[in-house]
Amino acid sequence: MTFRTRFAPSPTGYLHIGGARTALYCWLEARRRGGQFILRVEDTDRERSTDAAVQAILDGMSWLGLKPDEGPFYQTQRMDRYRAVAQQLLDAGNAYWAYESKAELDAMRAAMLAAGEKPRYGGAYRDRNEPRRDDPDRVLRFRNPREGKVVFDDKVKGRIEFDNAELDDLVLVRSDGFPTYNFAVVVDDIDMAISEVIRGDDHVNNTPRQINIYRALDAKPPGFAHLPMILGPDGQKLSKRHGAVSVMQYREDGYRPHALLNYLARLGWSHGDKEVFSIGQMIEWFDIADVNQSAARFDLAKLGWLNQQYLKNDDPREVALELAWHLRRIGIDPSDGPDATEVVIALRDRVQTLKEMAERARIWYAPIAAWDEKAVAKHLRAEGAAAVLRAAHGKFAALQEWSPQAIHLAIEEIANERAIGMGKIAQPLRVAITGTQVSPSIEQTVHLAGRDEALRRIDQAIAKI
RNA sequence: GCUCCCUUCGUCUAGCGGUCCAGGACGCUGCCCUCUCAAGGCGGAAACACGAGUUCGAUUCUCGUAGGGAGCGCCA
């Protein structure tokens, strides 16, 4: 039997961090074992599923590079199959029709809860053998075993045991004819020959019910692996304020897909002391059995550090492509200024995200928008600054070649001629070129501005003094 | 309320009975480097939730306690 995993999101929203990690682990595990990764959209909730959400999930996965080998499959297109399996269960005596109204069920649960019991279906119709008849409250329920235990070896959590007495007769088919989640997953996972179910640990409690359905269907249950949750930085459940946002938001915020994947892989899993993993290494070393059992907090600071690792170490030409996307987003035409690859090299040690990089790159693509008055006062209006700027202007204008090396030499010459430190030259120049006192090395800063623009800005700065 | 799950530095984690006065990483912090900011290099502070038990010996095994989480739907 080949190794097959699936990611089965319900399209009621975008792909968020938790979903992305589940998808990644499924994908990694399938890759490592040479199996297949299947995408299945669980859209049986007609009230909440939307096409926009389906698209958002697909977009998120595609940005992350988690390409399914099969699918996407849609549950709503498999209705005939669920109906057939429901009939099979009914014929075999493993299911029965029940006709309580929702109001009645609610009242039952409330009463049980009040009595200090676990709210469950009472099973009034379990042995009545009622025929199928037209009734707005008609549902098909599963005849869950009443005795014995369900035991399974979770790949992440270890051995988990449930008493059948704790379970009740869940609904398989709703009154609207649509299958419920617990029923549809089992049918799908059997049909799609899923060998390994990897999902969030909010499903642990559903697992024994599903295993009972597998048994009733005479099918071998797959292996299970339940992933612990991802918490917000405050240890609370992820919310929109901190992380439960679409993975696409991370793109907009300037994170690279590889960095996010690496961060997610490392959140709940580790391989020795390694922190930075290529995709190939993740595939080679990842093992679902090594995943941690406890919930982990999402730490933006570490994601930022990782993102910078990729900014620093990847091919700058490749990074430049992504930078260009961010430049356009803030209204800058990347062709209207220095080569983006050079900009990446100048800024990659200084920012953690592409978004920051784009913002800092602005100085070379657009005129100085605002002057840092403190910088002006401190460095431009400093003793001798004007003379230094004039000297720089002269040297720069006369340079044979406009390169960082040549600019650096020119500045050194000024320092030697005037017997002053580099700082006395670099800082006034920096303010002249950027309007601020922070930027990459002075020769890069000047070089990227372009000779004409650099000279123009030096003139402008002298005038400002 | 009931069932299930979880608990090592602030955070992510290593540890699978002695190698641990607990290792790595992010963050924080000191120094160095230095034209600013970074990046980088070298240091530092910082954790086994608690209580029993098993054992010659527990961070590692068992059981409790406390704390946290999930589920208990005709949602997934």
Image (cartoon, helix red, strand yellow):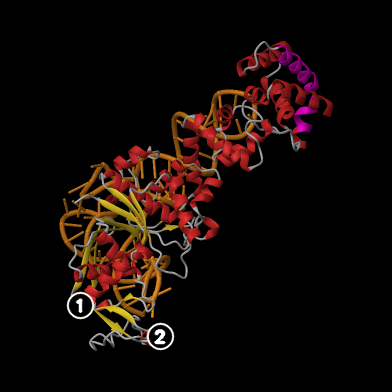
Q: Nearer the viewer, residue A394 or A66?
A: A66
The numbered dot on residue A110 is 2
Q: Main secondary structure of the magenta part?
A: helix
User: Which residue shows up at 48% across the image and 60% down it?
Assistant: A51
Q: Which residues are magenta?
A: A376-398
Q: Is residue A379 magenta?
A: yes
Q: Nearer the viewer, residue B74 or A112?
A: B74
Q: Who comes first in sequence, dot 1 or dot 2?
A: 1
Q: Is residue A183 magenta?
A: no
Q: Is residue A454 above or below residue B1?
A: above
User: Which residue shows up at 75% across the image and 28% down it?
Assistant: A379
The chain that hosts pointer 1 is A
Residue B39, x across and y down, in percent: 51, 32
The chain that hosts pointer 2 is A
Residue B70, x across and y down, in percent: 39, 67
> In the rendered image, which residue does mark 1 sit on?
A91
* Snapshot quadrant of residue A155: bottom left
* Snapshot quadrant of residue A443: top right
Residue A105, x across and y down, in percent: 38, 85
Kindly identify the amino acid type of the residue bearing the numbered disc 2: Ala
Of marks 1 and 2, the one in the foreground: 1
User: Which residue shows up at 50% across the image and 58% down it?
Assistant: A52
